């Protein structure tokens, strides 16, 4: 059984040896939340995804908490007239089956993909709707040394249109005119920990540059499969008021869409990140 580790006045209880920890002893609505930011940031770097329970905060408090970690993004799926555009509402129910059930990290189609996302549960199904997280540093380490070397030398293209052309009712060309496909290293160096992480995902990666279509598809399928090992994953069961904060540079996630036709309503705030790089000397 994992032990409870204290950092600052927070209690941090790992969910698995690889990834995920629950944080206790904090009220995210309290005025002293800023005092805990260094400890939260270090827990995020250590565990890649951290969870808080019973945090019945408002959308404004959600945004204010996220701002402690950086600038916030506005997602193109947010309605134009929404008063708090930093909030991305992810709602499913009898009229819409969940669509976040593919391994991915968020907005890798951006030139500077997100540092992290903070997701708040508003309404949860009676059962199901868990989110799974995978440690993409351990995914990288699960490759043979030769395959690690090959992957380190490759770049891949990430395309918003793969997911959002249909969802936003736009043509792929219209969407790409505003959000051009972006090329990122297949293995990125985490800008804070220096760890190499596998940075391709089933949702947004279209292909690996310089390979034939067949070679790219075969290699991507092999790289994607690394995330599916339960030994590098954790799985979070939501309650209303639960919050997950994940590091998009170090992890991927998959929202199980097993709850249809029940309702599941979540709100996400996404923190802007930096341009991915690969530093062979560091990681
Ligand atoms: C997401 O993919 O950002 C949402 C995950 C979830 O709804 O659990």
Image (cartoon, grey):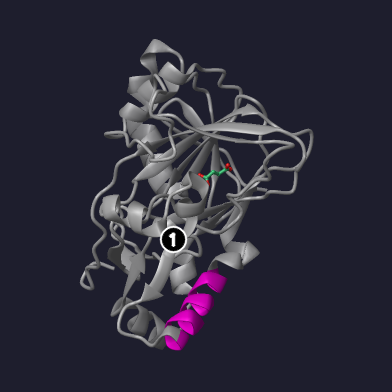
Residue 42 lies, with reference to residue 223, above or below; the image says above
Residue 239 falls in which quadrant of the image?
top right
> Which residue lies at the image location 30% right of the left edge and 84% below the top edge?
210
- Of residue 64 and residue 21, the one placed in the foreground of this image is 64
Mark 1: which secondary structure?
loop
54 relative to 246 in the view: left or right: right
Q: Which residues are magenta?
A: 214-226
Decide: is 3 above or below 177: above
Quarter of the image where ligand 1 sits: top right
Q: Nearer the viewer, residue 131 or 99?
A: 99
Instruction: Decide whether the magenta segment is chiefly helix, strand or loop.
Output: helix
Measuring 46% from the left and 60% from the top, which residue is drawn there? Answer: 162
Q: Is mark 1 within 8 Å of ligand 1?
A: no
Residue at image location 32% in from the left, 51% down from the top: 113
User: x, y percentage for residue 75?
Assistant: 38, 39
In front of the other: 256 or 37: 256
Describe residue 212's horizontal placement relative to residue 90 as left or right.
left
Which residue ends up furthest to the top in the rendered image?
31
Q: Residue at x 32, y 56 (%)?
A: 176
Query: Label 1 belongs to which residue?
Result: 204
* Residue 215 lies in the magenta stretch: yes
In magenta segment, residue 142:
no
Q: Quadrant of residue 94?
A: top right
In the displayed structure, 26 sits above or below 232; it is above
Q: Position of residue 35 (x, y in %)?
A: 34, 21
In the foreground, 173 or 257: 173
| Residue 278: % across, % down | 25, 67
Q: Quadrant of the C terminus?
A: bottom left
Percent coordinates x, y for residue 212 in the rendering: 39, 88
Crowding at dot 1, Cα within 10 Å, few <14 / some 14-19 / many 20+, comes out as many
């Amino acid at each position: 059984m994992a032990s409870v580790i204290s950092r600052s006045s927070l209690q941090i209880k790992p969910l698995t040896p690889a990834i995920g920890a629950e944080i206790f002893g904090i009220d995210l609505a309290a005025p002293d939340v800023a005092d805990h930011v260094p400890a939260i940031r270090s827990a995020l770097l250590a565990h890649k995804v951290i969870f808080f329970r019973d945090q019945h905060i408002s959308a404004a408090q959600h945004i204010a908490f996220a701002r402690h970690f950086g600038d916030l993004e506005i997602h193109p799926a947010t309605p134009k007239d929404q008063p708090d555009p930093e909030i991305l509402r992810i709602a499913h129910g009898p009229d819409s089956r969940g669509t976040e059930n593919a391994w991915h990290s968020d907005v890798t189609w951006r030139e500077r993909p997100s540092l992290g996302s903070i997701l708040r549960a508003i309404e949860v199904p009676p059962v199901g709707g868990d989110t799974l997280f995978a440690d993409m540093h351990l995914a990288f380490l699960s490759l043979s040394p030769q395959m690690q070397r090959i992957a380190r030398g490759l770049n891949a293209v990430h395309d918003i249109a793969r997911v959002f052309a249909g969802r936003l009712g736009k043509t792929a060309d219209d969407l790409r005119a505003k959000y051009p496909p972006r090329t990122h290293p297949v293995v990125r160096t985490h800008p804070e920990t220096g760890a190499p992480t596998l940075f391709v995902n089933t949702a947004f990666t279209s292909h690996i540059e310089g390979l034939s279509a067949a070679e790219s598809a075969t290699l991507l399928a092999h790289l994607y499969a690394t995330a599916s090992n339960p030994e590098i994953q954790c799985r979070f069961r939501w309650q209303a008021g639960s919050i997950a904060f994940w590091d998009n540079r170090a992890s991927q996630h998959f929202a199980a869409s097993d709850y249809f036709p029940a309702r599941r309503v979540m709100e996400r705030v996404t923190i802007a990140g930096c341009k991915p790089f690969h530093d062979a000397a560091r990681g």
